[in-house]
Image: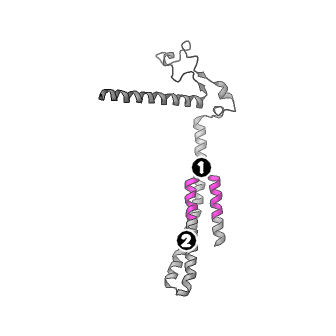
């Protein structure tokens, strides 16, 4: 019974590995402009030295040059992976640098706001009861502004990578609104 269970588990893993292999092969074919009649690779078409044997080649598996040359398909616009990744990485690094600059501005405003809050809180402790109500309202406004700036700061890093243009606009508007009030 135990051996039967082990064999059935092994068979399930083998089937899973085969289906994953086929899915990966289809993905590779799509990305590199190749087509395949079957999902398995024909290793018999290679000689022992690893070179391609043209007479024994699988006629169903060939490079699809029409897709590679066609500018309308996604495979036609593929550049060399190294230069494409380098360009993407450089743009991402520049975007992260912009995100950090904007975050520094928000942190600067938060630091100033914290100082104002602490000073007002010290004055509140020593104030008479008649002026405490006005100071309490001011402390509430500062707390609201702090919350607004903290949300802007977290928005930079939470959503900045995926939607930088909109996040930057929102954070700039938040900073502008904060500065108008103060």
Q: Residue at x 57, y 77 (%)?
A: 137
**Mark drawn on residue 143:** 2
Q: Locate the C terminus and report the quarter of the image it occupies.
A: bottom right
Q: Residue at x 51, y 16 (%)?
A: 45
Is residue 162 in the magenta section? yes
Q: Is residue 12 left or right of residue 111?
A: left
Residue 28: image x %, image y %? 55, 30
Q: Is most of the magenta stretch helix, strand or loop?
A: helix
Q: Secondary structure at mark 2?
A: helix
In the image, residue 43 above or below residue 125: above
Q: Nearer the viewer, residue 52 or 24?
A: 24
Question: Is label 1 in contact with label 2 (beta carbons under 8 Å)?
Answer: no
Q: Which residues are magenta?
A: 149-174
| Quarter of the rendering containing residue 113 | bottom right
Q: Secondary structure at mark 1?
A: loop
Residue 7: image x %, image y %? 35, 26
**Mark drawn on residue 162:** 1
| Quarter of the rendering containing residue 178 | bottom right
Q: Earlier in the sequence, mark 1 or mark 2?
A: 2
Residue 1: image x %, image y %? 30, 28
Q: Residue furthest top?
A: 55
Residue 165: image x %, image y %? 65, 53
């Amino acid at each position: 019974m135990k051996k039967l269970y082990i064999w059935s588990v092994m068979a399930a893993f083998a089937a899973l590995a085969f289906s994953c292999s086929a899915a990966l092969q289809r993905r590779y074919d799509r990305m590199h402009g190749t087509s395949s009649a079957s999902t398995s690779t024909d290793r018999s078409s290679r000689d022992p030295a690893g070179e391609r044997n043209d007479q024994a080649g699988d006629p169903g598996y060939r490079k699809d040059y029409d897709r590679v040359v066609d500018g309308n398909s996604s495979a036609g616009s593929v550049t060399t992976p190294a230069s494409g990744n380098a360009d993407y990485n450089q743009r991402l690094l520049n975007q992260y640098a912009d995100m950090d600059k904007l975050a520094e501005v928000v942190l600067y405003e938060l630091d100033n706001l914290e100082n104002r809050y602490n000073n007002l809180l010290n004055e509140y402790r020593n104030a008479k009861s008649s002026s405490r109500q006005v100071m309490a309202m001011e402390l509430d406004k500062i707390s609201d502004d702090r919350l607004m700036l903290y949300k802007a700061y977290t928005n930079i890093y939470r959503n900045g990578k995926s939607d930088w243009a909109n996040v930057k606009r929102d954070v700039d508007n938040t900073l502008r609104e904060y500065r108008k009030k103060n």
